[in-house]
Image (cartoon, rainbow, N blue to C red):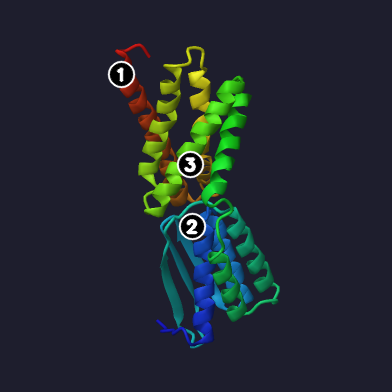
Amino acid sequence: MSHITEQTPEASCMEALQTAGRIIMENGGETYRAEETVNRMGTGFGLENVESFAVPSGLFISYQGEDGNPVTSVKRVHRLGRNLTRVDEVNQVSRKVFTGEMNCQAALAKLREIDAMPGAFRGVWSLPAAFLCASGFTALFGGGWLAIAVAGVVAALVQGIETLLDRFRNRGLTASVIGGFVTALLPHLLALAISDLQVELIIAGAIMPLVPGLAMTTAVQDTMRGDMVSGLSHGAQAILTAFLIAGGALLAVAVIRQMTGGAV
């Protein structure tokens, strides 16, 4: 097995392939997309016998080195969230590499810029996004103006809590439970003061930003393409997230029932 260093052009090519695949997988891209991108870029770099294998937690890359020996790499993937803009930018780099417009060093420099890009909705921008999402779904479900407004406010508050948890690197399963709990608790508390509040519609609308729709879609796509490992992994993640959100909501209902003596 060949040994490569960061000073060699071959090392730049490997790092570019690693970075491209990792960015795609860490930002909501499918595993097959990461594999196709790595293979396409490797061909564009002039590498021979490029092979890649991606699973949700890792990326394996191999190609034939200049000395004829195989060069392999294992890259650990840490899922950080969803940013399809980064995925699209990596695809643009991949096309330019494949057509010969970028070499290893230029592609690596551009990929590093993409990796450092801020999220599409950071900080306070995620709050109005959650407000509009929840309000729109509540209106779709037939809620009145009051229910639409309350659902938007609740979703924005939950998004604020998730953003805070994200700063402490704790946005995964814990955030799902807390999000479901707060989403169900606040409408029930308001219902104690407003008798005709449409609690069910508010909860249904406010919980929609928490639903792991992209993960389930990715699971179906991977499974239909025959990538059972990634499909089952993404599916299990989506189902577990949904169960945790529902568990948090049920916990909130149990708390309200204790407070009201079982009136809910």
- Mark carried by residue 259: 1
Residue 211 visible somewhere in the drawing: no
Please tell me how crowded label 3 is: few (under 14), some (14-19), or many (20+) other residues with Cα within 10 Å.
many
For marks 1 and 3, give the CA distance.
26 Å
The extreme front residue here reads 193
Which mark sits nearer the N-terminus, 2 or 3? 2
Secondary structure of the residue carrying tag 3 is helix
Comparing 56 with 79, the one in front is 79
- Three-letter amino acid code at the position of disc 2: Glu
- Three-letter amino acid code at the position of disc 3: Gln
Residue 212 visible somewhere in the drawing: yes
User: Which residue in the structure is indicated by mark 3?
Assistant: 159
Secondary structure of the residue carrying tag 1 is helix
For marks 2 and 3, give the CA distance.
20 Å
Secondary structure of the residue carrying tag 2 is helix
Residue found at x 44% / y 16%? 193
- Name the quarter where the C terminus is drawn: top left
Above or below, 60 against 4 in this view is above
For marks 2 and 1, give the CA distance.
42 Å
Q: Nearer the viewer, mark 2 or mark 1?
A: 1
Which mark sits nearer the N-terminus, 1 or 3? 3
Which mark sits nearer the N-terminus, 2 or 1? 2
Residue found at x 54% / y 52%? 122
Comparing 213 with 80, the one in front is 80
User: Which residue in the structure is indicated by mark 2?
Assistant: 26
